[in-house]
Image: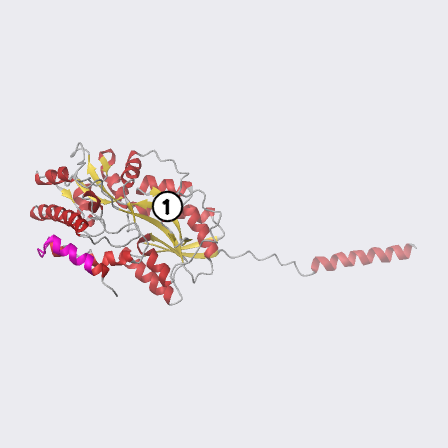
Amino acid sequence: MKKLGLLFSLLVIASIALTACGPKATPAPVAAPVEVTFWHAYGTGSAEETALATILASAATDLPNIKINVLQVPFNDIFTKYDTDVAAGGGPDMFIAPNDNLGGQVRTGTVADITELAAGKLGDYSDLAKGGMMYDGKLYGLPESLKAVVFWYNKDMIATPPATTDELKALMEGGTEVSITYGCYHEYGFFGSFGGQIFDDQFNFVTDAANQEKVTAAVSYVNDLYQISKANSWPKSDSDGLAPFTEGKAAAITNGNWAMGDYKKALGDKLGVAPLPAGPGGPSNPLLGVDGFYFNPNSQNQAAALEVAMYLTNKTAQTMMMNDAGHVPANTTVEVTDPLIKGLLEAFSTAYFRPQVEAMGNYWGNFCGTDQVFEAGTPAADWVAAGFAGATKPK
């Protein structure tokens, strides 16, 4: 029995030795992070780009399962580049932009329907903001912020902003430099000031003579402002007006709230905001747009891309974009205390929600050549009549 016990002990020792010398167990591989490619068009060095960079730096830590590859694309190129790349089978997983082209992109199939992907996840976002991401009852983007053109002014130079179109014209005629941004987007709000409509409730162009007279009155009024600007060599675009306004030369500028961060950085507490002036026809109604994140139908990482977009629109991120870049948040959990943001919300209350219908393309195509009036001298009534005729011309 002793010999058997000794033999058993030797076998156990040998077994342990063999195990110790055998191959090591291979640890389970660590899954590589999912890569999400993200495009944006925020200007280099702008308050928007700076705030976004800070948020993305936090995302690198807070979303360790996702690697975000970021590319800045100039705003004038982003829609064309995105649509071209997607049509060719490529493109980023997601990009952020205004809902300018949402309807057209849905119709051409370059943005993904995320109705099911986002189901039950958007309770913190306002209905108004979500509406800007929808087309024909389906959701095509995650809303980030609201925007429209307003009247920014330097409180040291203008104690009380002009409340009416007559007051604005008188201010400029009196020699106060105001940088009006002329163009079919920035000028849209003045149609409402004179009671004019481009579309009816069904998004048909309102072509009757009475309405055309009101639209003509708005165009004539803006032409009067243009001639004042031209005679004084004042800026006539948001880009040309940036330096004069932020350096205290121009007393006011018309522009969207995407520029608030830069204005606030330069002027601080001197910066004020007000709606575009009301007129004889009622309050102004600038086009209300929604910026949001859109997703590529070619992407294999849509779920991860949505996770990134939701991170970039959470309470912390939206608060930073609000405070640092002037974004009016889509996320309703953000506490709005800044009087400028409150002023923007007030100004937006009479805005016209930009429709995502095909007819909007006919507006851009027929009402954007205002230089024909301002520079070439075409009578406003003739130009307006031609605009409505072109917009309603059968294809």
Q: What predominant SS class does the magenta segment belong to?
A: helix
**Residue 284 versus residue 44 in the image, above or below:** above
Q: Residue at x 92, y 55 (%)?
A: 1
Residue 385 magenta-drawn? yes
Q: Residue at x 50, y 52 (%)?
A: 65
**Circle 1 SS class:** helix
Which x, y percent locates residue 372? 12, 57
Residue 247 showing in the rendered view: no
Which x, y percent locates residue 6? 86, 55
Task: Give the amino acid type for the residue marked by disc 1 in the picture.
Answer: Ala
Residue 263 magenta-drawn? no
Q: Which residue is mark 1?
A: 129
Residue 336 showing in the rendered view: yes
Quarter holding the C terminus?
A: bottom left
Q: Residue furthest right?
A: 1
Residue range in magenta is: 374-389
Q: Determine the image quadrant of residue 23.
A: bottom right
Could you tell whether 88 is left or right of 210 in the image? right
Which x, y percent locates residue 251? 16, 39
Which x, y percent locates residue 345? 30, 38
